[in-house]
Each structure stands twice: as C-alpha cells, then as structure tokens.
Image (tube, rainbow, N blue to C red):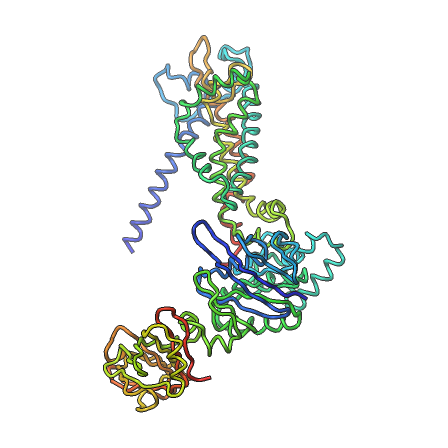
C-alpha cells in the first residue's frame, strides 16, 4: 500500500531548529513510533509527513513519489490529533462523514461508509448525538473513525492516548493495534510514553533536540541503546549511570570509595580501541543491580539505602553510592525484599549486563553481553 | 455564621450600589422622555423623579415641525435612518476586513508587527486625526455622504474587530482547521466550514461591540457631516428651539429611541454572548 521515506528533513522555526536532517524509512504496513520528550520535534515531523508543514529542506516520499508540494488532503493520510479535534458543532454522523462530504461522494455511499466505520468502532448507537456531549472515550473513537473513513494508506496518530486514564489507555492500546493489523495501513505513532511505543510499534524512532537518536526495533532500542540519551529514556525505572575512568585495563568508579573494578576480560582489546578518552560512563539497568550479594563482577561497591517503593510485584530500592550522596542508584528487587533505610549494602552486577559509554561523545562504546 | 451573613449583606449592598449607578442614567432618560415640558425643564426649580403627567409630547416634538417645542434642526427621521445606514455599513466593513485579518494574524502570523501598529492607532486621541481626515475627505468629496462616514467608521473600529476576533480565533484549537485540511479542505474551505461555525459567538459579540461604537459616535459624525447625513448623536446635540433653548425632553426621547437597536441586537444574540459554551471543542 504505502511506504514512507523521509530524506534529510529539516524544519526551522525562526532561529530554532525543530527537526534536523531526519532520515527515516518506513516500510509498507509497518507500525512505527516516534518517541521523545516534549519539544524534540516529533509532532513537527508528523506535520511534515501529513503536509501541514512544509520542510525547509529535504523531502517526504510516499511510494517513491516526492510529496513536498502535494496538499495534505491529497496525500492519502489520516491524521488523529492529540486533542482529537472533533468538530463539536456537528453530530457524530456529520463528524465521521466530513472527509467524504468534502470529496463530494454520493449520499448513499457516504451513509454506507459511515455506518460501517461506526460499527467497526462500536459507536453506531451514538451517530445522532452531538459531538460536544460525548465522553472522552467516545470522542477519541469518533476522531479515529473520522480519520479512517477516507481509507488512508497512511495513518498518523499524534499522542492519541495521552488524554485517557490509565485503565482505558490499556484497552485502547490493544484496540488500536488490532485495528491497524486488520486494516494494514502504514502507521506513524507519536508518543512520549515509552510503554506505548514499546508495546505497539514494530520499530521505534527515538528523537531528542530535533535529532534522531536511534531507529530500531523495541528489543534493540532497549538492549542496544546507541547513546546515553536512549539508554536513559527507555526503561522504567531508568538505567543507573556511574561515572568512571578507564586506565590500564581497570575501571575506577568515581562515586565509590573502593570503586576499582576489573571487567572486560577478553573483550578488553575491543573497547581499548574504541574508547577515545579515558572518561567513561557505566550503565546498569535496575533489574540487573543486585543488593547484598558480594562478588559478582562488581568488586566491592557499597551504597546506603535512601528509600524504597514496594510496588507489589517488586520493590524499587534507592541508594547513594558511599562516596557521593548526590547520585541515586536504583535497584529492582523481589517484593519480599525489605531494606532498612540508612543501611549500607554491597552492590553487585554481572558483566554481561553492563553498558559502556564514552562520556564525551555519550555514545555506547561497548555492550558486554550480546 | 454571623461572618457569613455580614459578608452576604455587604455583597448584596455592593451589587445594589453598582446597579443603581449603572441604571440611573437609563432610568432618568426613560422617565424624562415621558415628562411634559414643565416637568423636564429646570425652570420651576423642582425635580420630578417620576413623570406626574406622562405624555408623548417629546416624541411628537422630534418627529414634527409644527409644535412650539419643535427643534430648528428638523425632524429626527432622517438622522435615525442615517445612523442605521452608516453604523451597519461601517460595522460590516470592520467585520469583514477584521475577520480575515484576524484569522491571518492568528493562524499565519501575517503582517509581522502590523497588528500591533493597528492597535497603536487607537492610542491617538480621535480629535488628533479627525481634522486631517476631514481635509482628505473634503478633497475626495466624501464629507456629508453615507459612504464617507461608513468608510471612516469601518476604519476606526477595525482595530477593535481585528483584536477581538484574533482572541476568539486563538481560542479555537488550530488542530480543528488542520483536521479539516487533512480531510481534504483547502485552507479557505477549512476557515468557512470549521472555524466560522465555531467563531459564531465571537463574531456576533464583536459585531455588537463595533456596532455600538459606531452607533454612539459623536465626534466623527459632527465633523464629517453637515445636513444630509447627520446621525442621532449629532442630532441630539442640535435639539434646541428658539423659544425654550435646549430641549431636554425631546433629547431624552430621541436618546430612548437610540437605545433600541443595540438592546434589540443584544437580545437577539444573547445566547452567543455567553462565551465559552462554544469553545469546549477539545479536551485538554
């Protein structure tokens, strides 16, 4: 149906660059998520795909055809806005029929299409209701129906779930995925919620400060983050970072009194070559940071328990490393783990769960495990 | 409990004071319009709070030329028609230009610093610009014409219509027009199909406001009109008779008539004046 190629897109607003040389390839029927904090350029990217914004340079290509000068209405895209943009002065029927009426389809055909889409989304009993009286849940479905009815080859969803409460969000997430699989459109989904991106998308494009950081499958984004930003942005609770210096085959972690650890073994040669400076950051995900077990590959690191959050299925423990109370480390422990605040514990982690970043370039230099 | 009661009484008292303050002029005009000559004139040295012998003499006086109270300036029929014509046309000019300008400014940041300069125009005292305008108008043979007066009304009230409409358009989420554009509307199509229906309330209240400004103008009409196109406010100022001097009774009567169109218009669009009802378009 439709594949999308974004080729070195640039968009500036005044002096500010909103999107900087963004290149992405999205295959037909693929569901991709653009993920990033607010102001990272994800909505701007979306608006350039839809045609609402013209890129300052670069091109938007659908099926090999450059779309830069094609108006939004002729691009065959469906757009669902974060705030739904439902026309409250119309009833549900007229809202859904809007796109078809603009295209001047015969009334009986419009009627058939509207009812079909309404049935698919289970809002057929609401057709005569004024849109302003809808619950937020139904409003969202009306917005979805309105963007679906023109049978777009490309679906653009701008944070469609961010206004829903948590329970409903899970339901709608599953529903969206189902609908996308049934209809098979190429879908671009903008979100700042990593859970949505991880659970829905075939591939995730992580953006920050107008620049694409990484474009990969959810699995690779989590397990092979390209740099400090991606590693930090994905994962909850967030990854632990420990500043260190690499010298003579040994790491000295600055935040610990006895922070010298010896890791790397046979792979040392590899990162010897790749490291530009000696300043590094070691990353360990909270689920791999173990408390109370001596040994592991962590040497003799010690930290003081500051607080903990029993979440039912697990307990998150927050700690200061013994030489720097300004740093917080997190560890995900079993739910029956009950630490005492103020206690000093030893920390451990296994080498295979370590990420090695260059502190200057912030890039991932080495992943010890595969 | 006492504290609450005390607060309530104070609030009520304040409301009463403000209401009385605002409605007293209206009360005075209404009663004065129906007072016979001896009651509205100050000659007797006595104040009548209410017409003791209500009469329509004042209304007869402004519409006829025969009574002894008749003003030297002629009947009020022509000024009423004039006021309606120039105020309505002036309002139309300000609204049509204002709506498009405001939409351009609100959505496309059109005009750079021009919108603000437009507002600055209002910072001059009108008297400072009206003399040069009179000279211009005289050159263009536009003094004492309906189009001359309508045009200047449209221009003078334009900053109001632009800035009021801009705030209304700003309140309509731009996603709504964008949604329409993605659905296949042109930019102008989205404006008419989506933005205009939502801005109805704003348009109605802005139009009322601009109309009242035009309707109540005295200075511009005084300077730019002479005989044929004098408006109600100017005519009121001219209500004098050779016998009695200033005709306060007839002035009040004409003032009362002048109240009718804005009040009528206001009631007509009352449901739109409740702003905010129309702007629940989006869940934030």
Residue B72 sits above or below residue A181 on the image: above
Q: Is residue A236 visible?
A: yes
Residue B37 sits above or below residue A22 on the image: above
Q: Is residue A341 left or right of residue A115?
A: left
Q: Residue at x 45, y 19 (%)?
A: B132
**Label total for image:** 0
Front residue (pair A296, A95):
A296
Q: Is residue B230 left or right of residue B123?
A: right
Q: Residue at x 39, y 28 (%)?
A: B124
Q: Residue at x 74, y 54 (%)?
A: A105
Q: Is residue B231 left or right of residue B21?
A: right
Q: Residue at x 62, y 51 (%)?
A: A69
Quarter where residue B65 is shown: top right
Quarter of the image for the N terminus of chain B: give it. Answer: bottom left
Front residue (pair B157, A217):
A217
Residue A206, image x and y in percent? 48, 68
Quarter where residue A180 is shown: bottom right
Front residue (pair B196, A258):
A258
Front residue (pair A189, B97):
A189
Q: Is residue B249 visible?
A: no
Residue A299, image x and y in percent? 30, 87
Residue A359, image x and y in percent? 35, 71
Residue B120, image x and y in percent? 41, 33
């Amino acid at each position: 149906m439709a594949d999308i190629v974004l080729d070195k897109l640039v968009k500036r607003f005044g002096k500010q660059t909103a999107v900087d040389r963004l290149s992405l390839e999205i295959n037909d029927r693929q569901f991709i998520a653009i993920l990033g904090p607010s102001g990272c350029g994800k909505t701007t990217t979306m608006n350039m795909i839809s045609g609402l914004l013209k890129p300052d340079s670069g091109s938007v290509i659908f099926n090999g055809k450059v779309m830069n000068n094609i108006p939004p209405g002729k691009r065959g895209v469906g757009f669902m806005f974060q705030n739904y943009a439902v026309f409250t002065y119309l009833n549900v029927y007229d809202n859904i029929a809007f796109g078809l009426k603009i295209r001047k389809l015969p009334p009986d055909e419009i009627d058939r299409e509207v009812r079909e889409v309404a049935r698919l989304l289970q809002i057929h009993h609401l057709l005569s209701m004024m849109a302003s009286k809808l619950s937020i849940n139904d409003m969202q479905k009306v917005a979805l129906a309105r963007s679906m009815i023109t049978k777009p080859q490309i679906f653009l969803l701008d944070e469609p779930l961010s206004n829903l409460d948590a329970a409903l969000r899970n339901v709608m997430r599953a529903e969206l995925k189902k609908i996308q699989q049934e209809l098979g459109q190429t879908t671009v989904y903008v979100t700042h919620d990593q859970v949505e991106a991880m659970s829905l998308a075939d591939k995730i494009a992580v953006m920050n400060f107008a620049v694409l950081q990484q474009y990969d499958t959810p699995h690779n984004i989590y397990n092979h983050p390209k740099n400090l930003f991606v590693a930090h942005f994905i994962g909850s609770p967030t990854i632990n970072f420990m500043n260190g210096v690499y010298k003579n085959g040994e790491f000295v972690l600055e935040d610990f009194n006895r922070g010298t650890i010896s890791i790397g073994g046979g792979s040392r040669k590899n990162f010897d070559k790749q490291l530009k400076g000696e300043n590094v950051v070691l990353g360990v995900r909270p689920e791999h940071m173990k408390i109370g077990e001596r040994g592991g590959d962590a040497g003799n690191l010690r930290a003081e328990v500051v607080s903990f959050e029993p979440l039912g299925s697990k307990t998150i423990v927050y700690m200061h490393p013994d030489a720097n109370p300004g740093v917080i480390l997190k560890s995900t422990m079993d739910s029956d783990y009950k630490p005492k605040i103020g206690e000093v514990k030893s920390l451990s982690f296994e080498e295979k769960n370590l990420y090695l970043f260059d502190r200057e370039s912030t890039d991932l230099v080495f992943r010890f495990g595969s | 409990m006492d504290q609450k009661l005390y607060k309530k009484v104070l609030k009520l008292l304040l409301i009463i004071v403000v209401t009385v303050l605002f409605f007293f002029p209206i009360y005075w005009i209404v009663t004065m319009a129906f007072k016979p000559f001896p009651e509205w004139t100050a000659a007797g040295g006595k104040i009548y709070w209410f017409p003791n012998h209500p009469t329509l003499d004042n209304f007869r006086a402004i519409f006829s030329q025969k009574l002894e109270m008749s003003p030297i300036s002629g009947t009020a029929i022509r000024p009423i028609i004039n006021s309606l014509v120039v105020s309505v046309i002036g309002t139309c000019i300000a609204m049509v230009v204002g709506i498009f300008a405001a939409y351009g400014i609100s959505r496309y940041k059109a005009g750079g610093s021009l919108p603000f300069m437009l507002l600055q125009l209002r910072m001059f005292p009108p008297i400072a610009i009206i003399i040069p305008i009179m000279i211009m108008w005289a050159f263009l043979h536009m003094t004492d014409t309906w189009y001359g007066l309508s045009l200047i009304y449209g221009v003078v009230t334009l900053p109001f219509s632009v800035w009021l409409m801009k705030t209304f358009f700003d309140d309509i989420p731009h996603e709504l027009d964008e949604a329409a554009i993605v659905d296949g509307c042109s930019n102008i199509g989205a404006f008419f199909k989506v933005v205009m229906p939502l801005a109805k309330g704003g348009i109605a209240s802005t139009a009322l406001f601009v109309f009242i400004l035009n309707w109540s103008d005295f200075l511009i009409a005084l300077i730019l009109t002479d005989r044929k196109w004098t408006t109600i406010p100017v005519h009121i100022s001219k209500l004098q008779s050779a016998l009695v001097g200033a005709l306060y009774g007839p002035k009040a009567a004409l003032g009362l008539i002048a109240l009718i169109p804005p009040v009528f218009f206001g009631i007509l669009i009352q449901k739109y004046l409740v702003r905010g009802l129309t702007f629940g378009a989006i869940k934030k």
